[in-house]
Amino acid sequence: MKVAIGADHGGFALKEELKKALVNLGHDFVDYGTGSELSVDYPDFALPVALAVASGECPKGILVCGTGIGVSIVANKVPGVRAALVHSIQTATLAAEHNDANVLVLGGRLLAGALAAEMVKVWLATPFDQRHQRRVDKISAVEARFLTKKV
Ligand code: RB5
C-alpha cells in the first residue's frame, strides 16, 4: 500500500523511523516532509497528507507532530479524512476496526519508536469491522452538512 506520511519538527525523528518500518513491512510511502528538526508549522505538513488521502492518491496516511494534536485537528478538517490520534496498540487497532481511520496520528514526543512502529503495523493490518459502518456513515453525513467545496 502507498502510505502518505508527514510531520512537523516535533514529529520528524519518529517519521524517519516509521519510514523504515513501512519499508520493512513491504509498504510504499510518499514523504510530504518536513525534512529536518528546524521549526515549522504543522498545518503545512498535515494538509498535504490529508489531501493525498482524501483524493485517493494514497489510501492511508500517517501524521506525526509533538503531541499529535495539531496535525489531527488539521487533518480532520479535510472531508473524507478520519484521522485518529492513538496512544497504544489497542487504540491503533480500534481506530481501524471501529472508526475506519484512514490517517493514523502519533505523538512524536510521547512515543518510543518501536511501539509506534508496532502501532502502525497493527493499524495497517486490522480490517474495518462492518458492524460500525452506520456510525462511519454518520461521520460522512456530518461532513456533507458543512461541505461547500469538494476536494
Ligand atoms: C510544536 O512545538 C508542537 O506544538 C507541535 O509539534 C504539536 O505538538 C502541536 O500540536
Image (cartoon, rainbow, N blue to C red):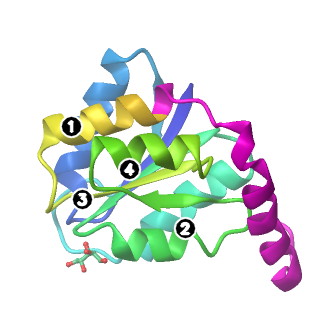
- Residue 151 visible in rendering: no
Q: Does the CB distance between marks 2 and 3 fall below 8 Å?
A: no
Judged from the image, the secondary structure of the residue bearing numbered disc 4 is: helix
Q: Quadrant of the C terminus?
A: bottom right
At 79% from the left and 66% from the top, the residue drawn is 138
Residue for badge 4: 91
* Above or below, 129 relative to 38: above
Query: What x and y, as percent, mark residue 11?
Result: 24, 59
Query: What x and y, as percent, mark residue 60?
Result: 57, 41
Neighbourhood count class around disc 3 (C-alpha, 10 Å): few under 14, some 14–19, many 20 upward: many
Q: Is mark 3 within 8 Å of ligand 1?
A: yes
* Left-right relation of 135 to 67: right
- Mark with earlier residue (2, 3): 3
**Which dot marks residue 17?**
1
Judged from the image, the secondary structure of the residue bearing numbered disc 3 is: loop
- Between marks 4 and 3, how big is the CA–CA gap? 19 Å
- Mark with earlier residue (2, 4): 2
Is residue 144 rendered magenta in the image? yes
